């Protein structure tokens, strides 16, 4: 079952990782201000979420937040 997640890491994604995320998981929205990178609405199942987290781990990404987004919160934030 697919769910939506907000994922935040410290710093920016390493070169090529954003392309790899899109290749493996479809259109992934990524926002970065240099100090923090956010994937605000990652729509994946739990196995894919684990794969995303493993990719971040593999490049020494410092995970700050993984948050399940409820369907009600999505409607409010649109």
Image (cartoon, grey):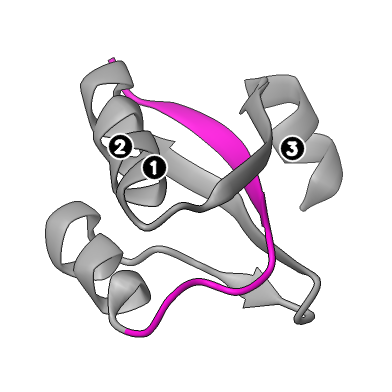
The answer to which of 44 and 32 lies nearer the viewer is 32
Question: How far, Cα to Cα, is label 3 from label 2?
Answer: 29 Å
Q: How far is disc 2 from disc 1 in space, using C-alphas?
A: 5 Å
- Check the picture and name the quadrant holding the N terminus: top left
Left or right, 7 with respect to 65, comes to: left
Which badge, 3 or 1, comes first in the chain's sequence?
1
Q: Give the residues in magenta.
A: 1-15
* Residue placed most toward the observer, 69 or 60: 60
**Residue at mark 3 to residue at mark 1: CA–CA distance:** 31 Å
33 left or right of 32 in image: right
Label at residue 54: 2
Residue at (55% x, 69% y) in the render: 30
Please state which of the two labelled residues, at mark 3 or mark 1, is closer to the viewer.
1
Question: Among all residues in the image, which is located at the extreme left?
Answer: 24
Residue 21, given in percent of the width and then of the height, sits at 28, 62
Q: Residue at x 22, y 53 (%)?
A: 25
For mark 2, give the secondary structure. Answer: helix
Circle 1 is placed at which residue position? 57
Residue 9 image point, x, y percent: 65, 52
Q: Name which residue lies at 41% across and 40% down.
A: 43
Which residue is disc 3 drawn over?
75
Q: Earlier in the sequence, mark 3 or mark 2?
A: 2
Callout 1 crowding tier (Cα within 10 Å): few <14, some 14–19, many ≥20: few
């Amino acid at each position: 079952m697919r769910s939506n997640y907000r994922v935040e890491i410290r710093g920016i994604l390493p070169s090529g990782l954003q392309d790899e995320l899109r290749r493996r998981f479809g259109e992934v929205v990524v926002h970065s201000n240099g100090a923090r990178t956010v994937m605000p609405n990652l729509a994946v199942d739990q196995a894919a979420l684990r794969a995303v987290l493993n990719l971040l781990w593999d490049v020494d990404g410092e995970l700050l937040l993984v948050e399940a987004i409820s369907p009600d919160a999505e409607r409010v934030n649109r």
